[in-house]
Amino acid sequence: MFMVVAWGGVLCAPAARAGMFGCVPERSGVCATSGWRDALLNADAPGLIAPTWRFQTGRLNRSSPAVAHDTVYVGSHDGNLYALGAGDGKAKWALQTDGELASSPATDATSVYVAAGDGTVYGIDAASGKPRWTFRTGKPLPPPYMGWDLYQSSPIVADGVVYVGSADGRVYALAAADGKPLWSFQTQARVRATPALANGVVYAGSMDGRLYALDARSGKPRWTFKTAGNAQFPLGEVQSSPAVAGDTVYFGSRDGFLYALDAHTGAKRWAFDNKGSWVISSPAVADGMVYVGTSDAHTVLAIDAASGKQQWSFDARGRVFSSPVVVGKAVYVGLCDGELVALDRPTGKLLGYVSTEGTIYSSPAVHESSVYFGSDDGFIYAAR
């Protein structure tokens, strides 16, 4: 069952610019945006940035927003997908699903796509919030162990196809127009990572500890890479979503490594050792640098993309599960201590921050001159 609630006002009109987790199908985390201003960011005197607006939902907010059509689309653990005005945070509509929404929506010119916690994938009219189609995935596989299963795979959309992972262990390709399955590929555990698409290949990580490179047209595997694992987590579960830049794919694992693989062959180029600290955060890659958060090491890192050598480390004072985005001179990422921070790209110095009352597992999205994110305090935030 689902229900659409619409609020008064003018609904959004379709536009060509799309939004999705990681900004682009390659999931690089580099967000092109017009009208961006870095005026409030200052490494010499980093200050508190007051929210432009905040919108209260019914529960935790671990979904990462997608912004398109001058609208912020974001899910909540209350089961609603919300469409909020990018400028004022006022609700345009809300679609009630039957599951928690820890998946981030993706958009194209006319539709929004999201995967709910009950295994249903939705294709939704962006203007009205009415479902155009639904697709039900299979029975969830058991988690490798209990705990920290915080996210659901988020859809990406490109060239009329929606790609998404599922708790049934499959990666699906669905027709964006009607939700009909084009192919599916079975892994050996839940797929919580968001796929990345580049050069006709879908890259998808699984909780079975593998990264799969699948042909985008057929779903047939081109290669498979197995993480090293460690004594505590021998599977080396992959929750971190891959990012593709050039001919390299980057992703993290619960075995504590950040991996760089040849995108064509799956050969390992390097692996950065976080000494057992999980890499749940999904990397962003820009201008020869990889930016990523770590769990027990409590850091945000900048790693040289070619060599795998650390360039700087920011002390986050707690776990970092949120995934960075890069825009202007800054890296934006949420921290488990409740702050959304802007870090200087060359040095890692703090430039500014937004403070909330809850843990931030949501990853930020940017649009024009604003950054948007959710918090476990029950609010969706915008700041500029």
Image (cartoon, rainbow, N blue to C red):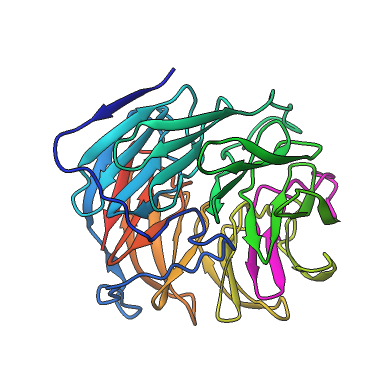
Outermost residue to the top: 1
Picture quarter containing residue 376? Answer: top left
Residue 140 on image: x %, y % = 69, 26
Q: Which residue shows up at 78% across the image and 53% down it?
A: 212
Q: Nearer the viewer, residue 54 or 365?
A: 365
Please give the name of the residue rendered at 57% of the width and 61% of the height, measured from the top-left corner. Answer: 27
Residue 242 in the figure: left or right of residue 359 = right
Quarter of the view holding residue 52: bottom left
Q: Is residue 140 above or below residue 245?
A: above
Residue located at (39% from left, 76% from top): 328
Q: Position of residue 266 (x, y in %)?
A: 82, 64
Name the one closer to the observer, 297 or 340.
Answer: 340
Q: Main secondary structure of the magenta part?
A: loop
Q: Which residues are magenta?
A: 226-254
Image location (x, y in percent) of residue 242: 65, 58
Query: As drawn, which residue projects farthest toward the left?
Result: 9
